[in-house]
Image (spheres, coloured by chain):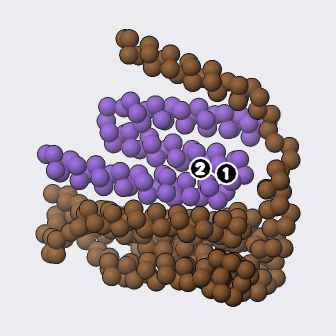
C-alpha cells in the first residue's frame, strides 16, 4: 500500500517535471527538468523491483545525457553568438 | 485555438483507444511459459544468480552484441562529426574550477571507477552488469573532466580498449560455436558453484569486455564533446 502511494506521488512528479521540461522558457531549466524525470523514473524502476534498469536509467538517463545536452547547448550558443 | 482543440481531440481519441487496455488490466499472477522456463531452469542451465544477466548475456546474447554495435556506431559518428584539428585543444580558454570540486574529485573519481569495475565484474551475482558498469565509469570521467577541464584524455587508449574488447566479445561468441553448443554459448567455461564469483561459465568474461567497451565508447563521446568546448 505504502509502495503504491509512493509510486503515484513519483508518477505525478514525473508528469510535472516533463511539462516543465517541455514548456519552460529557460532551456537550462528544461534540461535539468528532463534529468530529474530520469532520476524519478529510476526510483520508480527500483520500487517496481527492476534494479538493473534503475541503474542504467540513473547513470545514462540522468547523468550522461544531461551532461551531453549541456555540452551541445554550450557549443550551439558559441556558434550562434 | 483550433489547433489546440484539435490536439485535445486527438488526445481524447488516444485515451479512448487505450482505455480498454487499462480497464482490462489486472496484473499477472503467474509467469508466462517463456518467463517460467527462464525462472525455473535458468539457474541450472546458465548458473547465474542474477536472472536478468542470464537472459541478457546468454539467452539473448545476440541482442546484446547488437546493442553494443549500435553504441559503437553512435560513438563513431560523434567522433567523426566533432573531429578536432590538431593543436586546437591547446588554444581553448577554459573556466577555472573551484577548489572544493577539484579536491572532491581527486577522492571520488578513483572510487567511482572502482565501483564501475565492481558492478560489471559482479554482473552475474548482483544487479548491474556491463552496460551499467560502463556508464558508471563514464560518469566518473565526466566528474574528472568537470574538475580538471585542461586534462588530456588519451584517445589512443580509449580506441585500443574499445577495439580489443569488441573483438574479444565476438571471438568468445565464435569460440562458443566451435567448442560449445552455439554462438555466445556460456558452457565454454565450467559453470562452477552457483553464486560464487567464478561461476556462470563465460558470463563474467563477456561482461568484463562489455563493460570495458561501453565505458570506452561513452568516454569517447564525452571527451570528444569536451574537447570541442570553448568557454571564452
Q: Is residue B8 above or below residue A80?
A: above
- Would you say the residues marked 2 and 1 are in contact, meaning their CB atoms lie under 8 Å apart? yes
Please identify the residue farthest to the top as the structure is shown: B1
* Gap between marks 2 and 1 measured at Cα: 6 Å
- Give the labeled residue for mark 2: A42
Residue B115: give x, y in percent of width and height.
Answer: 57, 72
User: What's the chain of the residue with tag 1?
Assistant: A
- Give the labeled residue for mark 1: A46
User: What's the chain of the residue with tag 2?
Assistant: A
Task: Tell whether B107 sits left or right of A7.
Answer: left
**x 32%, y 39%: residue:** A27
Q: Which chain is brown?
A: B
Q: Is residue A22 visible?
A: yes
**x 79%, y 62%: residue:** B38
Q: Is residue B143 visible?
A: no
Q: Are marks 2 and 1 on the same chain?
A: yes
Residue B2: give x, y in percent of width and height.
Answer: 38, 11
Q: Secondary structure at mark 1?
A: helix
**x 81%, y 42%: residue:** B28
Task: Tell whether B107 sits left or right of B55.
Answer: left
Q: Is residue B218 above or below residue A4?
A: below
Q: Secondary structure at mark 2?
A: helix
Image quarter (top left, top right, bottom left or bottom right) of the C terminus of chain B: bottom left
Checking the image for residue A78, the label placed there is none
- What color was chain A assigned in the picture? purple
Q: Is residue B21 above or below residue A41?
A: above
Image quarter (top left, top right, bottom left or bottom right) of the N terminus of chain B: top left
Task: Tell whether B153 sits left or right of B41.
Answer: left
**x 58%, y 66%: residue:** B64
Q: How many marks?
A: 2
Residue B86: give x, y in percent of width and height.
Answer: 16, 75
Amino acid at each position: 500500500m505504502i509502495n503504491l502511494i509512493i509510486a503515484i506521488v513519483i508518477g505525478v512528479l514525473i508528469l510535472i517535471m516533463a511539462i516543465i521540461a517541455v514548456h519552460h522558457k529557460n532551456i537550462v531549466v528544461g534540461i535539468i527538468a528532463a534529468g530529474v524525470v530520469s532520476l524519478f523514473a529510476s526510483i520508480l524502476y527500483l520500487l517496481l523491483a527492476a534494479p538493473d534498469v534503475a541503474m542504467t536509467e540513473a547513470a545514462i538517463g540522468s547523468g550522461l545525457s544531461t551532461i551531453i545536452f549541456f555540452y551541445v547547448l554550450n557549443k550551439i550558443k558559441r556558434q550562434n553568438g | 485555438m483550433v489547433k489546440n482543440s484539435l490536439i485535445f481531440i486527438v488526445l481524447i481519441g488516444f485515451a479512448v483507444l487505450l482505455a480498454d487496455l487499462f480497464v482490462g488490466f489486472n496484473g499477472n499472477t503467474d509467469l508466462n511459459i517463456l518467463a517460467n522456463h527462464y525462472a525455473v531452469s535458468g539457474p541450472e542451465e546458465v548458473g547465474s544468480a542474477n536472472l536478468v544477466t542470464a537472459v541478457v548475456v546468454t539467452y539473448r546474447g545476440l541482442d546484446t552484441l547488437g546493442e553494443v554495435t549500435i553504441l559503437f556506431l553512435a560513438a563513431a559518428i560523434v567522433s567523426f562529426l566533432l573531429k578536432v584539428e590538431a593543436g586546437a585543444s591547446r588554444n581553448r580558454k577554459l573556466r577555472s574550477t573551484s577548489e572544493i570540486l577539484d579536491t572532491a574529485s581527486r577522492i571520488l573519481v578513483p572510487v567511482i571507477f572502482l565501483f564501475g569495475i565492481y558492478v560489471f565484474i559482479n554482473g552475474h551475482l548482483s544487479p548491474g552488469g556491463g552496460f551499467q558498469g560502463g556508464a558508471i565509469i563514464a560518469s566518473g570521467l565526466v566528474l574528472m573532466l568537470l574538475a580538471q577541464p585542461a586534462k588530456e584524455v588519451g584517445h589512443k587508449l580509449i580506441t585500443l580498449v574499445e577495439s580489443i574488447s569488441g573483438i574479444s566479445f565476438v571471438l568468445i561468441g565464435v569460440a562458443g560455436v566451435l567448442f560449445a553448443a552455439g554462438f555466445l554459448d556460456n558452457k565454454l567455461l565450467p559453470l562452477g558453484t552457483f553464486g560464487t564469483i567464478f561461476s556462470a561459465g563465460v558470463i563474467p568474461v563477456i561482461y568484463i569486455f562489455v563493460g570495458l567497451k561501453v565505458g570506452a565508447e561513452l568516454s569517447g563521446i564525452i571527451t570528444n564533446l569536451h574537447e570541442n568546448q570553448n568557454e571564452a
